[in-house]
């Protein structure tokens, strides 16, 4: 694995900040779908919570790495990439949920 430069860390920082903002947006599961599927809102709520926590962890570690090169030596790259990867997977799952909810609403309109 290659060494991360300050530019790489800055890019990661911006990606994690955008992800955190996206998780902060209320990912609704449609009320009709929520009434039909009791477990789905719980599942997507847990996915949102995990995504927020992993993004916050990766964001803090990246922020520390940007401002303290000595701390970055002690922080393994995987401590940033594993939570970052989990956060991105959670964002993809929630995006798929949002798309399916919109398609269901469109189908019910017709």
Image (spheres, rainbow, N blue to C red):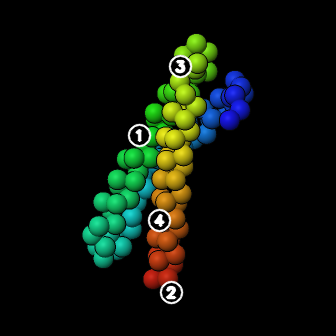
Distance of label 1 from label 2 (alpha carbons): 39 Å
Distance of label 3 from label 2 (alpha carbons): 57 Å
Q: Where is residue 97 in the image (x, y as percent from the top left)?
A: 47, 65
Q: Where is residue 108 in the image (x, y as percent from the top left)?
A: 45, 83
> Which residue in the protein does label 1 denote?
53
* Element under disc 1: helix
In this view, the mark in front (1 or 4):
1
Distance of label 4 from label 3 (alpha carbons): 38 Å
Q: Where is residue 85 in the image (x, y as percent from the top left)?
A: 54, 46
* Element under disc 4: helix
> Which residue in the protein does label 3 denote?
74
Compared to residue 95, the image places residue 33 above or below, namely below
Q: Where is residue 93 in the image (x, y as percent from the top left)?
A: 49, 60
In this view, the mark in front (3 or 1):
3
Please tell me which residue is depicted at 27% across the width and 69% down the height of the picture.
38
Q: Residues within 10 Å of mark 4 (few under 14, many from 20)?
A: some
Q: Earlier in the sequence, mark 4 or mark 3?
A: 3
Q: Which of marks 1 and 4 is nearer the N terminus?
A: 1
Q: Which of marks 3 and 1 is nearer the N terminus?
A: 1
In this view, the mark in front (2 or 4):
4
Q: Which of marks 1 and 2 is nearer the N terminus?
A: 1
Q: Earlier in the sequence, mark 3 or mark 2?
A: 3
Compared to residue 81, the image places residue 3 above or below, namely above
> Which residue in the protein does label 2 denote?
110
Q: 12 left or right of 92?
A: right
Marks 4,3: beta carbons within 8 A: no
């Amino acid at each position: 694995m290659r060494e991360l430069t300050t530019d790489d860390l800055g890019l990661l920082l911006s990606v994690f900040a955008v992800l955190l903002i996206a998780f902060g947006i209320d990912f609704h599961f449609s009320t009709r779908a929520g009434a039909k599927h009791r477990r789905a809102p719980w599942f997507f709520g847990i996915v949102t919570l995990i995504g927020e926590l992993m993004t916050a962890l990766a964001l803090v570690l990246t922020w520390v790495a940007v401002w303290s090169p000595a701390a970055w030596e002690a922080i393994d790259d995987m401590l940033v990439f594993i939570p970052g990867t989990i956060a991105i997977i959670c964002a993809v799952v929630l995006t798929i949920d949002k798309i399916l909810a919109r398609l269901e609403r469109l189908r019910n309109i017709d």
